[in-house]
Image (cartoon, rainbow, N blue to C red):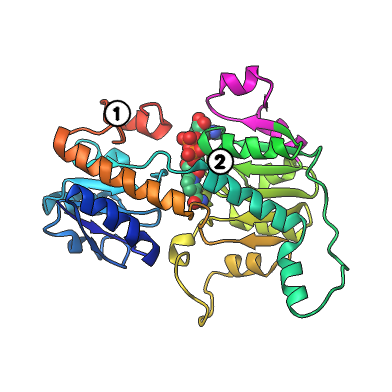
Amino acid sequence: MKIAFFDTKPYDKPSFEKYGKEKGITFKYFETKLNEDTVDLANGYDGVCVFVNDTVNAPVIDRLCEMGVKVVALRCAGFNNVDVKHAYGKIHVLRVPAYSPYAVAEHTMALLLTSIRRIHKAYIRTRDFNFSLAGMTGFDLHGKTVGVIGTGRIGRAFIDICRGFGMKILAYDKFRASDLENGGIVKYVELDELFSSSDIISLHCPLTEDTYHIIDEKSIEKCKRGVVILNTSRGALVDAEALLAGIKSRKVGAACLDVYEEESDFFFEDFSGHILEDDILARLISMPNVIVTSHQAFLTEEALSNIAETTVHNIVELFEKNQCPNELCYRGGNAEDCKSGKCF
Ligand code: NAD
């Protein structure tokens, strides 16, 4: 089997080579992202392997089908970059539903601690032999309330970490988890209460029509003054302009972002010698109380290995059995079900 691998980074290759060789899959690595301009590179391949910022929209899907490509193998969990409705019945779309929720949850806590204990400032100061503590006062996490939106795999892992810090947990999810609720681990509340009662808000839900800009001007207005907002899920969950306004008005005390609405234009690439065209991103990064990482929460050795193993397994299973449990809609869910996540 021959698979065209898009948006390749050096850290992708070792695991995919290892598991690909074991299962007789040859990967051709392209550095470019998949989109309407680059889709023809997939001509002659059995499938494409794509990541979070590749574009799998209707024209791309149609062209892949015309060229006889049978499968789109996502090497990630989220699939908001795929037009699932259009793909349904035309091409198989596979994903990696879980690879290491700990990787993302631990990165989220790393960002939070860095931000509120000013580690990013301290690192730079002490390298310059500046041992002053002025402006470095943080706050204890113990006893603080964290509002977790999305209590799936990553949300749960993050909740476990927060409990270790002695934090109180409020949660919101479209589908409540009875074990978390009945076990007294979290208190499920409506969004308005979560916004008004949380010192820290962390997003762990998928990007859907329901969750688009779940953090916007109105929700920020409902938050406590000084709220810390954590987004390691998907950029468009947060209205970046509203967040910037919230930071400027001091309503938002800090923000930690591993994802950004317009990240596909910048993230994963080196722009250090260039003038950044995105004024909102540049302004956010310039803030002393904003930390941005470029979608790296997943990037651990364990996660990379699990991603490659599951992706290869998905492709093999699909070609051998013509179905795969990690296929979107594989049990006949229709497009509407897909959008709401009911068919998984
Ligand atoms: P999951 O499917 O296990 O959990 C998602 C949870 O969100 C579920 O409990 C679901 O019921 C809930 N949900 C769905 N719609 C909702 C809504 N409208 N409002 C509130 N909650 C809703 O997924 P996961 O593995 O925990 O991943 C969560 C998200 O993290 C992914 O969708 C992806 O966008 C993101 N992610 C980011 C990275 C990264 O590197 N930054 C890596 C992996 C995943």
Considering the numbered disc 1 on the image, is that residue within a helix, a strand or a loop?
A: loop
Q: Is residue 108 or residue 72 the one in the foreground?
A: 108
Indicate the amino acid at tag 2.
His
Q: Amino acid at mark 1?
A: Asn
Q: Earlier in the sequence, mark 1 or mark 2?
A: 2
Front-most of residues 69 and 141: 141
| Residue labelled 1 has its Cβ within 8 Å of some atom of ligand 1 | no
Mark 1, residue position: 334
Residue 188, image x, y percentages: 66, 25
Q: Is residue 59 visible?
A: no
Label 2 SS: loop
> Assess mark 2: CB under 8 A from ligand 1?
yes
* Measured Cα–Cα span from mark 1 to mark 2: 25 Å
Rendered location of residue 270, percent (x, y): 47, 74
> Which residue is pictured at 31% across the width and 67% down the height?
32
Q: Is residue 93 left or right of residue 79?
A: left
Residue placed most toward the observer, 234 or 323: 323
* Residue 324 sits in quarter: top left
| Disc 2 crowd, CA 10 A, few/some/many (<14, 14-19, 20+) | many
Give the farthest residue toward the top. Answer: 182
Q: Is residue 222 above or below residue 124?
A: above
Q: Quadrant of the C terminus?
A: top left
Q: Which residue is mark 2?
A: 204
Whether 127 is among the magenta residues is no
Stretch in magenta:
170-198
Residue at (56, 49) in percent of width and height: 232
